[in-house]
């Protein structure tokens, strides 16, 4: 059986709840690992709307790898996509300490586009890079998140334990509250795969994190206390 992280499990749960309530857009499926696809498409009054789904176990809104160029001491994104374009608009790479030179890159040489080892990268090196690179809790304006999702034509979000919200605009007039959580960008170094992998099997990462949960919504796609199912009508 393939491994599913907590976010994927929760997304599947919400997809099935929407399906049971008959509001899944015909022919659609949940996004799963497809980062550029909406998590869920739901149907309201015969129109299709996109929904972002987040679990409450420290959700992120787009974790991306970053690379360091030893020749000019510049950081760049490993891939260029809609998320990194959004991050560039916020100048997030400028938050990395300009005096920090990762030991990982000092002990590697790049040949034909691939890094090979010049000398051993130890656990002590890994921990040093972690300590110097990690840069947590840099506030990011919430309306920047709204703009990011509106550019993807996504205006609603479901958050585990908090409920259902609109983002930039309540485009379907569902009369749900607007998301009011707080966000920050976090930089970190972590192992690729299992923590028992050798120290050099690591990545430098940036992720937009939810710093504080939004005010609980009166509406929720899952039964939770006094919260009601949003007024979503398939016809």
Image (spheres, grey):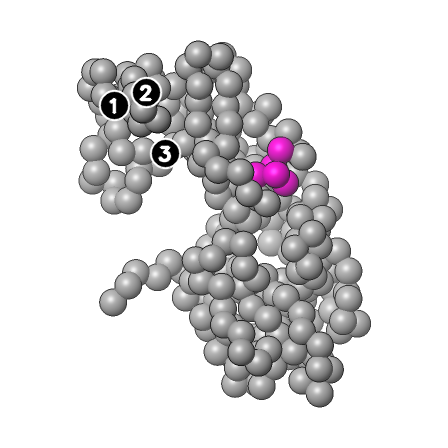
Identify the residue at image location x=61%, y=38%.
85
Looking at the rendered structure, the secondary structure element under dot 1 is: strand
Q: Position of residue 141 (x, y in %)?
A: 70, 41
Q: Where is residue 193 in the image (x, y as percent from the top left)?
A: 28, 44
- State the mark number for residue 179: none
Check the image and report above or below for 45 versus 81: below
Mark 3 vs mark 2: which is more N-terminal?
2
Mark 2 vs mark 1: which is more N-terminal?
2
Looking at the rendered structure, the secondary structure element under dot 2 is: strand
Identify the residue at image location x=67%, y=64%.
156
Q: How far apart are marks 3 and 1 (CA)?
A: 15 Å
Residues at discs 3 and 1 in contact (Cβ within 8 Å): no
Given this view, does label 3 or label 2 mark the residue nearer the observer?
A: 2
- Mark 2 sits on what residue? 110
Residue 207 in sight from this viewpoint: yes
Q: How far apart are marks 2 and 1 (CA)?
A: 6 Å
- The quarter of the rendered structure image containing the N terminus is bottom left
86 within the magenta span: yes
Residue segment shown in magenta: 84-88
Mark 3 vs mark 1: which is more N-terminal?
1
Q: Where is residue 155 in the image (x, y as percent from the top left)?
A: 69, 61
- Mark 1 sits on what residue? 116
Quadrant in the rendering for residue 39? bottom right
Identify the residue at image location x=41%, y=31%.
204
- Mark 3 sits on what residue? 203
Residues at discs 2 and 1 in contact (Cβ within 8 Å): yes
How crowded pointer 1 is (Cα within 10 Å; few <14, some 14-19, many 20+) is rated as few
Q: Relative to the observer, which residue lies in front, 185 or 87? A: 87
């Amino acid at each position: 059986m393939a491994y599913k992280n907590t976010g994927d499990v929760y997304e599947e749960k919400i997809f099935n709840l929407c399906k049971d309530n008959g509001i899944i857009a015909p022919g659609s499926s949940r996004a799963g690992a497809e980062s550029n696809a909406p998590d869920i498409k739901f149907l309201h009054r015969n129109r299709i709307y996109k929904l972002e789904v987040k679990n409450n176990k420290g959700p992120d809104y787009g974790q991306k790898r970053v690379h360091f160029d030893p020749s000019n001491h510049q950081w760049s994104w490993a891939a260029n996509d809609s998320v990194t374009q959004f991050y560039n608009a916020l100048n997030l790479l400028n938050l990395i300490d300009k005096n920090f030179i990762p030991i990982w890159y000092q002990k590697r040489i790049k040949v034909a586009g691939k890094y090979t080892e010049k000398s051993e990268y130890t656990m002590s090196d890994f921990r040093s890079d972690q300590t110097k690179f990690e840069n947590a809790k840099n506030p990011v304006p919430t309306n920047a998140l709204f703009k990011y999702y509106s550019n993807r034509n996504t205006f609603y979000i479901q958050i585990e334990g908090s409920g259902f919200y609109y983002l930039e605009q309540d485009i379907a007039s569902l009369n749900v509250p607007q998301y009011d959580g707080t966000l920050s960008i976090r930089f970190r170094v972590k192992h690729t795969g299992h923590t028992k992998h050798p120290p050099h099997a690591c990545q430098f990462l940036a992720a937009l994190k939810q710093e504080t949960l939004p005010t609980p919504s009166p509406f929720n796609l899952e039964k939770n206390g006094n919260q009601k199912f949003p007024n979503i009508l398939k016809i």
